[in-house]
Image (tube, rainbow, N blue to C red):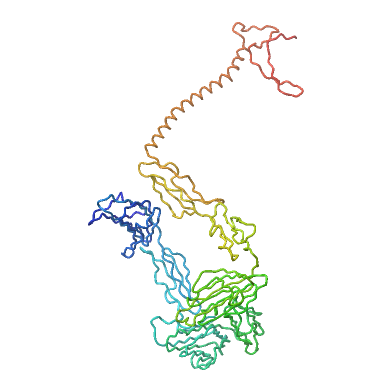
């Protein structure tokens, strides 16, 4: 059975399975437009033991199992990886078959996120069809492969080409050089034997070049030669076979060009070099550089007399050079000393109120056979909080934390291999950290290292107070935050709490977890199904803006709004625009309509009669007295044309009238006129 509509239902009662061999079975295939996938939602499933219901994706003609009867539950959503999904149902001929109903609809497929190249990065504009991904490499590496990939529309969207890689080239030429790097070349996986590489670097006319050796590790069979010119016939500035040490102070060219030759007899894991080059103007010193640190200068042009002061990043220490250097020599300026190095040391004595402890040689990998001890001491009335942010060592390396200034003190923690963040408190102002790396580390591999921060904290018997929570509040179980005290966080209406809502002060005076935060709710709760209807949801997550369209089954009529929209409010949680509608049978709807018509048939005549009676009443009460008064003024039939001198012509039956009489309080006074004799 095949389906091609963008939305519909697969109902086993509508399309029962057919006999095949000793079973009854049926396959339902849903195929939609290219670039779209099929989303199935389980509406109902009621299967007997032994029956099979499999939902499978179709990828390049092969079936991929997505779910089966053991995993299917009502409300579950399954998405296909391509524009086709297949549902297979098998049952037994001698029993009543199980039933199921699946709702399907289309969704837009996308390309998977492209792999970020080692020593490079990728920027993705869009993952859907037509989306673009841009790749670039770090300084010193070259991109092998296309720089830009496009997401291609297909039954399963894919990128236009495989992701490129970043590799360090074996040689090359750089013209009009400003700044860059020369790196040890990347060996292809299948390459054997030696290699010979040559780099030629040319600065703009009138400038010179400075080489800074950030790293230089050569095998005994390797050789590196640096020439002050374009060819290997130029003057030699450095030869690794003849030099006794690495020129960490750097090399300056005589002219505007430098050539670097590197030869290796065979690939060697120990070979590694990283040479930074930069061009600078004659009559100036070159711009200094320090890895894992920074510097300040008195003159950004580095003219004669400029001083530069170096500082290291936290956890690193200055080595192999002074903290301050000066640009000297008027004829050919140069720095009076080499730039120092910033290195993460193996052990040390630390007494600052806060600091950073790094694995030896960080961010480079630590070496095998390290045995380091750090001792931390703070104020006598204080203690230490140690926050291990990164811990990635091998299973043969050991990191131990001692609660005191000796290796015989109580062990706060001992770690082997990789671990998540750790938080430790000392009971005294002293802490000892020991790290041992296995001498056979090259056999078992190397870990990335570790990063830990320490800070001096108060020495008391209570946990530190926790901050207030934005868009919420906290309550405390105890006045003092002693061991066992709890702080409970709650969010304002319209916000959900993210994290643990209750934190406990533990025996080591640390909190059981980090404080949570309140996140604004941007979704509506599911309003539910409507009996005798189907619904179409624009977003299964029910975010703000989601619409739900209800449609009644044949024979039923919708009462209420058929379209509900989730909208956000400034306060409170998002809600739906209308109440949930109802689907009533057409017969019930007609009965309700007939009752309404009968009510109208009774109500309308009553209303008309009431209006007529009301009008008659108004007519009698308002117009009859006036008409009677008019007849009195005219006299009776026998008195026509007769006038009695001195007689009052006002009829005795005339209605009273209200006349305004001046009184002390100037108020209205009701008076009536009656027939009487008037004098003169």
Q: Position of residue 537 (x, y in %)?
A: 42, 52
Location of residue 122 with respect to 622 vertically, above or below: below
Q: Position of residue 404 (x, y in %)?
A: 61, 74
Q: Position of residue 585 (x, y in %)?
A: 38, 39
- Name the residue at the right extreme: 664
Is residue 5 rendered to the left or right of residue 309? left
* Quadrant containing the C terminus in the rendered view: top right
Q: Position of residue 538 (x, y in %)?
A: 43, 53
At x 49%, y 53%, the residue is 523
- Name the residue at the top extreme: 638
Q: Nearer the viewer, residue 474 or 296?
A: 474
Task: Count the numbered circles shown.
Answer: 0
Is residue 298 rendered to the left or right of residue 262? right
Location of residue 304 with respect to 148 vertically, above or below: below
Asked whether residue 178 appears in the rendered view, the answer is no
Res 88 → quadrant: bottom left
Location of residue 679 with respect to 182 vertically, above or below: above
Asked whether residue 583 appears in the rendered view, the answer is yes
């Amino acid at each position: 059975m095949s389906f091609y509509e963008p939305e519909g239902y697969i109902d086993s009662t509508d399309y029962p399975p057919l006999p095949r061999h000793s079973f009854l079975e049926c396959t339902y295939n849903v195929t939609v437009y290219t670039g779209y996938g099929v989303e199935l939602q389980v509406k109902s499933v009621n299967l007997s033991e032994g029956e099979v219901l499999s939902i499978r994706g179709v990828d390049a003609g092969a079936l991929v199992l997505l779910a089966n009867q053991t995993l299917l539950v009502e409300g579950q959503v399954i998405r296909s990886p391509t524009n086709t999904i297949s549902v297979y149902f098998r049952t037994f001929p001698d029993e009543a078959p199980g039933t199921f109903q699946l709702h399907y609809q289309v969704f837009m497929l996308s390309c998977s996120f492209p792999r970020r190249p080692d020593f490079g990065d990728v920027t993705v504009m869009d993952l859907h069809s037509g989306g673009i991904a841009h790749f670039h490499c770090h300084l010193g590496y070259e991109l092998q492969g296309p720089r830009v990939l496009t997401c291609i529309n297909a039954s399963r969207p894919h990128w236009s080409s495989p992701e490129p890689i970043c590799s360090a080239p074996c040689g090359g030429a750089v013209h009009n050089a400003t700044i860059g790097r020369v790196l040890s070349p990347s060996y292809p996986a299948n390459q054997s034997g030696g290699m010979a590489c040559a780099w030629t670097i040319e600065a703009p006319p009138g400038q010179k070049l400075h080489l800074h050796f950030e790293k230089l590790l050569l095998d005994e069979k390797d050789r590196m030669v640096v020439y002050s010119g374009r060819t290997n016939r130029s003057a030699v500035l450095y030869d690794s076979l003849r030099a006794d040490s690495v020129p960490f102070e750097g090399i300056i060219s005589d002219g505007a060009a430098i050539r670097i030759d590197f030869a290796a007899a065979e690939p060697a894991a120990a070979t590694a070099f990283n040479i930074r080059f930069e061009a600078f103007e004659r009559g100036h010193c070159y711009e200094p550089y320090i890895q894992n640190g920074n510097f300040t200068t008195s003159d950004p042009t580095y003219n004669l007399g400029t001083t530069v002061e170096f500082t290291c990043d936290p956890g690193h220490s200055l080595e192999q050079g002074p903290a301050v250097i000066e640009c000297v020599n008027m004829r050919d300026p140069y720095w009076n000393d080499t730039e120092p190095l910033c290195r993460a040391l193996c052990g040390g004595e630390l007494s600052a109120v806060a600091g950073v402890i790094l694995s030896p040689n960080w961010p480079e990998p630590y070496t095998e056979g390290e045995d380091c001890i750090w001792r931390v001491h703070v104020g006598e009335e204080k203690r230490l909080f140690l926050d291990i942010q990164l811990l990635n060592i091998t299973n043969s390396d050991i990191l131990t934390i001692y609660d005191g200034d000796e290796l015989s003190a109580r062990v706060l923690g001992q770690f082997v291999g990789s671990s998540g963040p750790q938080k430790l408190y000392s009971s005294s102002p002293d802490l000892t950290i020991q790290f041992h790396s296995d001498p056979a580390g090259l056999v078992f591999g190397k870990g990335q290292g570790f990063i830990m921060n320490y800070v001096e904290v108060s020495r008391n018997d209570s946990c530190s107070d926790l901050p207030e929570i934005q868009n919420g509040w906290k309550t405390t179980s105890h006045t003092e935050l002693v061991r066992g005290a709890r702080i409970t966080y709650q969010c304002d209406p319209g916000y959900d709490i993210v994290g643990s809502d209750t934190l406990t002060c533990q025996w080591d005076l640390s909190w059981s977890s980090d404080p949570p935060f309140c996140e604004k709710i941007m979704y509506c709760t599911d309003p539910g199904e409507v009996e005798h209807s189907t619904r179409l949801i624009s977003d299964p997550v029910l975010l703000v803006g989601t619409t739900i369209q209800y449609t009644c089954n044949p024979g039923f009529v919708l009462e209420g709004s058929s379209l509900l929209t989730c909208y956000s409010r400034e306060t409170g949680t998002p809600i739906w625009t209308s109440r949930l509608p109802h689907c009533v049978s057409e017969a019930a709807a007609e009965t309700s309509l007939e009752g309404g018509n009968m009510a109208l048939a009774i109500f309308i005549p009553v209303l008309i009669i009431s209006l007529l009676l009301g009008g008659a009443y108004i007519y009698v009460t308002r117009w009859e007295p006036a008409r009677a008064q008019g007849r009195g003024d005219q006299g009776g039939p026998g008195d026509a044309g007769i006038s009695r001198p001195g007689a009052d012509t006002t009829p005795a039956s005339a209605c009273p009238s209200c006349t305004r009489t001046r009184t002390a309080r100037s108020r209205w006074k009701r008076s009536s006129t009656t027939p009487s004799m008037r004098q003169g």
